[in-house]
Image: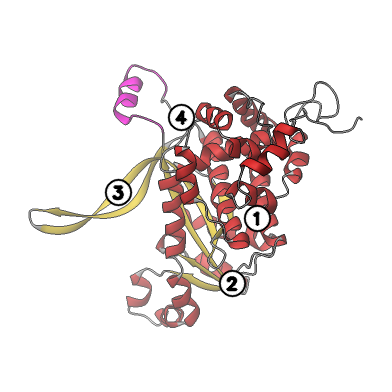
Amino acid sequence: MGKERCKDSGLNSFHGSFLYEQAVPQDHFWIKLNQVIDWRRFTRKLLKYYRGRGEIGQAPYNPTLILKMLLLSHLFNISERQTEEVVNDSLSAKCFVGLAANERAPDHSTLTVFKDRLIEKEGTKAYEELFNEIVKIAQEKGVKFGKVQIIDSVHTVADVNIGKDKARQKEGKPPRDGDACWGVKGEKVVWSNGKRRKETEYFYGYKDQVSLNAEAEIITSVKPGYGDEYDGRYLPYLVERDLKKGIGIETVAADRAYDDGENHYFLETKGKSSAIRLHDYRTEKKDKNKEGWIKLKESKEYQEGLKERYKIERKFGEMKKWHGFGRCRYLGLLKHAIQCYLTCMVVNLKRIVKLLTGTGFREETRSYLRA
């Protein structure tokens, strides 16, 4: 087989590195991100999904360039067509993705072909590998991961107008998103006739299981899923994934949705402390079996673990407010998984750069979009 090669971007020309060194501040977030991440690792991983593997046939765009454009799209919560325009209009964006200043960005349809190529070859596994590589880089760079791991689920509303979709189905047409389903979001407080009561709140879409390290505030494992799935079944899955990555977990914190006897037993067999918030009935029942639950609730690990839970809620808020994770960009579970993994990669990259260089992102992002 031949040597791997990609289309020459002209980055080493006058309109490339030389110009960027003069025009783009060296403390710019994009410069710091490129310094922290060795993107060549992703090029090698991604070329295997190309028919000629970059060895035979016409030289393709560097697949990492396409990946970076997709990350920009989720970073700014803009469409892929808008991402093409942003890269063409911004020197700093071109510098980040690896294009010379006088080059045009790949067409937005190229991004669609790239996404579909990965799904067709290995489904969501390809995106999971990319996500895992980011976590691995953080570990190699010396990011400190703590002993408390937080697990929770985050919902994303499907890109469906419920009323119109019902009308479509009455006419015998299929639903707009055949994989989306109803799930329980939680409880909200409502007032009726001057009285306060709790009411179950529902959503129509998808629900993803997420594991976050409390100290690093980096998402270490994720499992995209359907909206009606039971949260508790995924705690062992996420913990096992984290342990395989070398995350030194000592305590696992989660809300009541994960308060399943099997989960407590699983953590015990792994030698981990449980900080899964207990249902009241465990400590209020009138028999001797409650003593063990009372002891757990009074333990230092339980109380300290639950104090960290706000961090994962804050991370979900960041994903929804700034990166569009409140609503699905695509239709179907497979396409939703793409959004899930890329969004998690985006918030992890922001956090890694902040921890390693002290360079923040949000303020620069707003000024960048106005430029």
Category of crowding for the residue at label 2, using alpha-carbon neighbours closer than 10 angstroms: few (below 14), some (14–19), many (at least 20):
some
At mark 2, the secondary structure is: loop
Nearest to the eye among marks 1 and 4: give it.
Answer: 1
Q: CA distance from mark 2 to mark 4?
A: 40 Å
Relative to residue 49, is residue 222 depicted above or below?
Answer: below
Instruction: Calculate the distance from the C-alpha at mark 1 to the C-alpha at mark 4.
Output: 32 Å
21 displayed left or right of 202 = right
- Circle 1 sits on which residue? 135
**Magenta residue span:** 159-174
Quarter occupied by residue 88: top right
Residue identified by numbered label 3? 201
SS for callout 3: strand
Q: Mark 3 packing: few (<14 Cα in 10 Å), some, or many (20+)?
A: few
**Residue type at tag 3:** Glu
Query: Which residue is tagged 2?
Result: 147
Q: Which residue is mark 4?
A: 178
Cα separation, mark 1 vs mark 2, equals 16 Å
What's under tag 2, amino acid-wise? Lys
Query: Which amino acid, mark 4?
Result: Gly
